[in-house]
Amino acid sequence: MSQTPQRITPRIFKGTRDFLPAAMIPREDILETIRGAFHRYGFAPLQTPAFEYLEILTGKSGGEADKLIYNLAYKGGDELALHYDLTVPLARVVAQYPDQLPLPFRRYQIQPVWRADRPQLRQGRFREFVQCDADIVGVDSTLADAEIIALTAGVLADLGFGSDQRRFVILVNDRRLLSALTAWAGLDPQTELAKVCRCLDKYDKVGRDGVEAEFDRERVPAEAVHRLLRLFDLGEAAGGAAAAEKLAALGRYAAELRPALDELAALFAALEALGVPDERWSFTPWLARGLDYYTGPIFESVLPAKPHIGSLTGGGRYDGLVGRFAKRDLPATGTTIGIDRIFAAMEQLGMITERPSRTRVLVADFGPETRSASLRLAAELRRAGIDTEVYLEEAKLGKQFKYADRLNIPLVALIGPEEAAAGTVDLKRLADGRQVSVAAEDSVDEVRNLLAG
């Protein structure tokens, strides 16, 4: 006697999600918008495996990366892991295919990544999520950094961010400036910069007093703390003339800051030439971005009206990473556009319209007598580029109309026995109930008219 199989409870791992069509369709629209911006800026697509050798992934930031990695057991004995970002795979690819990738190499990559991290659903932070990266490898000029910032501004504007509650700001700073300030404060940048950046990076969460307390816990000398906290006295400044004034104010502190300030001035001039509006970016002298592989300009975009979301995008220059895998180092800069953070923000701002289907026309079924005519109509509409679905079983028209209404399909095409005999098609628009009868050969044009109207 056979036993009934035990039922398995359907469930998913915490920090991951299923995207049903109503949510997946707007996500696809967002991704297409981002992909279109990447193309406009001349970036080429790249795809890499979901897993890498563990030693490849841990070559980026050491112990910090270890905390994020999902290790994979492999019977061959090699240590593998799911990639937790797309920057390390890019560096590995550039080192592995030096003769096949002309420099500068402008690549974009849109793939899932996995992090063994604590999920925060309201902030759009998950254990499995999609990253949209754009990077330029092989150029050490600040023009490359300016291109990445301009691309970021273009993507967010294309997605509908820009004013009022949807206003975004790209925060800009430079690790070289933070290094120079660390030296001016009497600390050794080689050993103390990472500590300084970790403390400054907590400003958004703990404020100025909290950062001062962090410096105290890290046993940073009081005089050094006094100098470093002048960053907050300066305040941040919207782009253009205001940012230039902040650079001038910093320049009055010490001559050793001048080289870093000159690099920032060149970056700001390039942003102006690229047409990035002043209100879209801000010089934020305490911006640190905690990862310690950044070596130059750093940037991230935020929504002032939704501070709990955190950064929508983030990146910077990382000139030392490719050299960990190649015989020679190559400069690189780039950004990550967080589709999940963006989607969460757009949902909370009412910018997402759920769509259960992309179908524009449902061809109803009247049974075997007229089915061939219905299928021919569906094929013709599809050849014309109109998303068309055929109802696949004989059913009452009321049930078929209810199906179309539930999926927000705007138009139903009807070929019953009378229409088939007369060579016509009845088209009904569900939004207002308008119904017209047209010759079968005119159905494509009339469908377009009804959809447009």
Image (cartoon, rainbow, N blue to C red):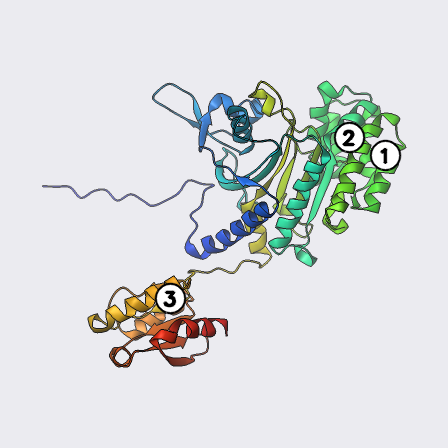
Q: Nearer the viewer, mark 2 or mark 3?
A: 3
Q: Give the secondary structure at mark 1.
A: helix
Q: Which residue is mark 3?
A: 381
Residues marked 2 and 3 touching at CB (< 8 Å): no
What's the distance in space between the residues labelled 1 and 3, CA to CA? Answer: 64 Å
Q: Which residue is mark 1?
A: 250
Residue 216 seen in render: yes
Establish if 72 lies above or below 432.
above
The amino acid at mark 3 is Leu
| Type of amino acid under label 1 | Leu
Q: 185 left or right of 298?
A: right
- In front here: 378 or 409? 378
Q: Nearer the viewer, residue 195 or 31?
A: 31
Name the element at disc 2: helix
Single out the residue that lies furthest toward the left.
1
Q: Nearer the viewer, residue 2 or 128?
A: 128
Kindly indicate whether the residue at mark 2 contacts the one at mark 1 (C-beta within 8 angstroms): yes
In-image side of 403 versus 92 (left or right):
left
User: Which mark identifies residue 177?
Assistant: 2
What residue type is disc 2 on? Leu
